[in-house]
Image (cartoon, rainbow, N blue to C red):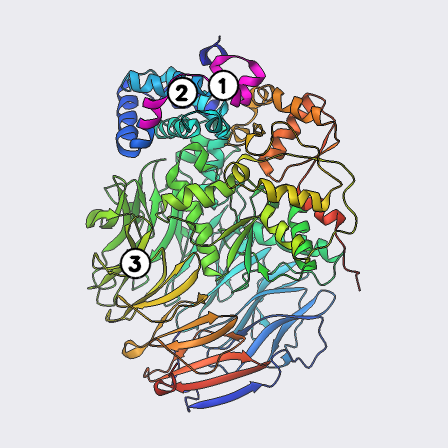
Amino acid sequence: MQAASTWDWTPGKKTILEDATACSSEYEWMQESVASPDGESLAAIVKLGDEEFTMCVNGEPWENVFEKAWNPKYSPDGRLTAIVMTDMAWTVAIEAEAWEETYDFVWNTSFSENGEIVAASIQSEGRYGWNVDGTPWDELFENANNFVLSKDGSATAAAVQVKSLAQADIAGFQSGIFSVAVGGVAWDSIFMNCWTPAFDATASKVATAIRTSLYDYSVAVDGKAWPASFACVWEPAFNPATGEVVAPVRHQGAWGMAQDGKILWKPAFFQCWRPAFSDDGKILAAIVAPEYGKFTVAVNGRPWEAMFPVVTDLVMSPDGATIAAQSSEDNVNFRIMVNGKVWNGTYDMAFGPVVGPGGNVACRVEKAGKQAILLNGKAYPESFDQAFDPIFSPDGGKVLIRGVAGGKYQRIVAEAGAFKG
Amino acid sequence: MSTIADRRIEDAGLEAGIARLTPEKIKKTIEAVLAGECGARLKTYIETCVRCGMCAKACHYYMSHKDPSYAPVGKVKQTMWEIINKKGDVTPEFIHQCAQVAYTECNLCRRCMHYCPLGIDTAYIMSVVRRICHKLGVTPQYIQDTAHSHSATMNQMWVKDDEWIDTLFWQEDEARDEMPNLRIPLDKEGADFMYSVIAPEPKFRTQLIYQAAYIFNAAGLNWTMPSFPGWDNSNMAMFTGDSEIMARIERQHFEAAQRLRVKRIVMGECGHAFRAVYDMGNRWLGWKWHPVPVVHSIEFFWELLTSGKIKIAQKYPGPVTVHDPCNTIRGRGLMDKLREVVNMICDGIVEMHPNREHNYCCCAGGGVINCGPPFKNVRIVGNKIKAEQLKATGVKTCVAPCHNCHGGLDDIIHKFDVGMELKFLGDIIYQCMEKPEAE
C-alpha cells in the first residue's frame, strides 16, 4: 500500500464513526466492513430489501442499488469498488458508478499499484478474459484462469484455453490446449498446463510455469520454454534489474532455484517457493524447508537459522535490507520473523507483516479475539474487535491504524514511540 | 485360480499408453521410481511378507469372487513381485495388467493392513505400482481426465472460476426462500473456518451446499468459502500416481485457507479428500502435519450437536445402519464420533458386521469409481460381499458420510436389490434439525 503525503498524518486518534454499523437507510443486514486506505471511510455491503444491495460508506448508502453486490474493495488510491448485478448482468461499480459494459459474470477485481487502473476477470457468453477500466480484451477465450495484472496496470495476462477439448479426450489434453494471453493475444506456443504467469518490471515480458508432458515441468518466457525441464516447478519471478527469470524447481526429489533454466540454488531443500527480489535484483529470497517439516526463509540461497513447521507471507523492502515473514505451528503460535530474528510474542493469528520505509516492520495480530498492531515487535496499546492492516506514512515514521473497537470505527496516526507493548 | 490376464478390459487410456511403450522405457522408468522414490518402506514390505495369505479375507474383491488372484497378496504377486524379480524387464502388456490391478481392483482401502500379521500396507505397494504406471503414461482414461481437470482448473470437474462463484450465489438464492437472511459468506477474512467441498457438489450435488449453508447459518457460525481456486478439496491426482499435481492441488487448498486467515478448514462429507489433505499432499509438500487444522464433517457435526448449536427436532425414523468410510475411519479413527452423531440424529443403529476399522470398503474409493464405465461391472460384482453385509442388517437406511461411498454403495444396492436408501449426515441433520422460524 502506497500512502500519500496528502493524508492527515497528524498524530492522534479520530473517531470516524460512533457506530460502525450505522446506515441512514434501514437495512436487513450489513456485511463485512472494508476500510479506505487513508482510514477516513468505512464501507460495507448492505441489503436494503428484496434484491436490493448497495454499499454503505460512513453511514450513507450509495444512491445506486443493485440486485446483487459482492467483493467490495478499495483501490489503493481510495476509490470504493464492488462487483454488482442488475437485470442478471454483472459489472464493476466504482464509487457507485457502474461500468457501462456488462457481462455474464465478473470477478477478481484488481488494481495497479497506484490504484489508477481497475481491472476484473470477465465471462461473456462462455468466453473468458480481462476487462481493464471498462474495456474488455478484443479476444476472449474458452477458458481463462491464473489472471495477473502488471504492477503498473499497463498489461494483463492469463492462462487461456486455446483449443477445444472433447469430453475425456486425454490425448487432446496432453497434446496441449493451454497458452498464455497477454493483453488478449495468445502466445503461438501451446502447453499442457500454464500456471502463475508473472510480468517483468517493465510489464513487457511474461514468464509462466508450464508442464509440457505429464512429467516435464519448466518455465516459458514470452512463449519460449527453457531448454531444461524439471520434475516440478513453482511460480517464476523476474529479476527486476537484469530481466533474468528464476523459479523454484524440483530435481531428484529435492527443491532448489533455477535461473533461466540453469540451477542457481542447489536442490537441497524439502520445499522452496515464493521467490522475491529486491529492486536492484541483488537479493533473492524464498520460503524454504531445509529439513523435513521445518520451514524458514533463504536469502540468496542461505536459510535463516530459525525454523518453524509453517512459514508464509514473505515480504521484502525494495532495497532488500529488510525481509520479513510469519511462522506458525498448527495454525496457532504465530510469530513474526525479520531478517532471521524472531519477535518475542506469539499470537493466535497474524495477518502478514508489512515493511515500511526505513526498514520498519508492522503487523496486525490477534490474541484471545482482540486484534492489535505491532511495530518492530512492540504493540500499540489499544486493541480492536476488528482492525485492518497497518499503513506506513511516506517517510516511514508514523503508522496509520484503522480499527473498530466498542462499536466505534477509529483512525489513529501513531508515532513509533507510541508502540510500547 | 484366474489371473489378471484372464479378465483383461480394454480402456482407451490403457491401450494408448502401452502402445507408446518400449522395453527400454519401461525398465528405465521402473528403475527410476524404485531407486529414486521408494526406500526402506517398500523393501521392508517386500522382504517381510511370509505369503501366509491372511490378507485374502480382508479384501472385498476376494470375498466376492473367492479367487486368490484378487487377494491383496495375489495383487502384489501379479505386479510388484514380478517387477522386482524381473528387474523391470517386463512387457507393455504386463504394464497394462499392472494398471488394471492397481487402479481398478484395489481401492487402497487399507483393510488388508489390519489383517496382515506383519502390518504390511498393500495399498502403499499398489500406490507405487500406480506411480510407475503414471510415469509410463498408462492410466485409465476417465481418471486421467479427472487428473487433467485438476491440473487445469484446480478442481476435478472442469468447473471454471466463475461457475463456482455463480453456483454459490444460486444456492444462496435457493436457500433464502427457506431462510431469508441466509448467507454463504465469500472470502470472509478471519472466519472461524473455511468450508471446502469436492467439485461434484457444485456440479451435481448442489443440495449439499444448500444444506451445509442452512445448517451453518442456523447454528450462527462464523464461516466462509473462498471465491477463488482452492475451494475443491478432492484429489484424484493422488490416485493416478501424479504426486506433483496432487501436491499442487493441496498447496492451493491450504493457501486458500491461509490467505483467508481462517482458524481451520472444515471439509464436507468426502473421505479421499481427507486422506489427501491430512496424509498425502501435505507431507509431499514438506509439511509434517497439515499447516491449517482440518476437520471432517463427522467431527464437525459432532461438535455442533454436542455443543447444542444444532438441535434435533425429531430423530430420523430408523433404525439405520452405518457405513464406515476407510479414509475417515481406518485413516483417522472417527468411528466412535460417527456413531455418536448417528445416534443423536437417528432412531438407533443396526451395525453391519464386521464394522468400524474392519468394515468392508464401498469399492468406489481409491479412484476406482473414477476409472469410469469400462470397469464399472467389475467394481460392482467385486463388492457382492458388501451388498450381503448391507442386506443382513435388515434396515432400510444406510448412513454413509463419503461421496465415493455413496457412488459405490448406490451401484451395489441397485445391482443386488438391497432395497436401501443412502443418506449423508448432512441430509439427515438438515431434515431433522430444529429450524428457525422464517420471519
The residue under the point 27% across, 19% down is B87
Measured as percent of width and height from the top left, residue A249 is found at 28, 47
Dot 3: few (<14), some (14–19), or many (≥20) neighbours within 10 Å?
many
Report the disc number at residue B170: none
What residue range appears in magenta?
A: B44-71
Q: As drawn, is B192 to the left or to the right of A65? A: left
Asked which secondary structure carries label 2, the reply is helix
> Residue under mark 1: which chain is it in?
B
Report the disc number at residue B76: 2
Residue tagged by mark 1? B56
Discs 2 and 1 lie in a common subunit: yes
Label 1 amino acid? Ala
Q: As drawn, is B115 to the left or to the right of B87? A: right
Separation of disc 3 and disc 1 at Cα? 46 Å
The residue under the point 45% across, 17% down is B53
Measured as percent of width and height from the top left, residue B348 is found at 73, 39
The secondary structure that most of the magenta stretch takes on is helix
Discs 3 and 2 lie in a common subunit: no
The residue under the point 72% across, 77% down is A26
Asked which secondary structure carries label 1, the reply is helix
Tags 3 and 1 touching, CB below 8 Å: no
Looking at this view, is B174 or A172 the one in front? B174
* Residue B62 counted in the magenta span: yes
**Callout in the foreground (2, 1):** 1
Label 3 amino acid? Met
Looking at this view, is A18 or A118 the one in front? A18
Report the disc number at residue A307: 3
Looking at this view, is B437 or B96 the one in front? B437
Furthest residue toward front: B117
Measured as percent of width and height from the top left, residue A49 is found at 74, 69
Asked which secondary structure carries label 3, the reply is loop
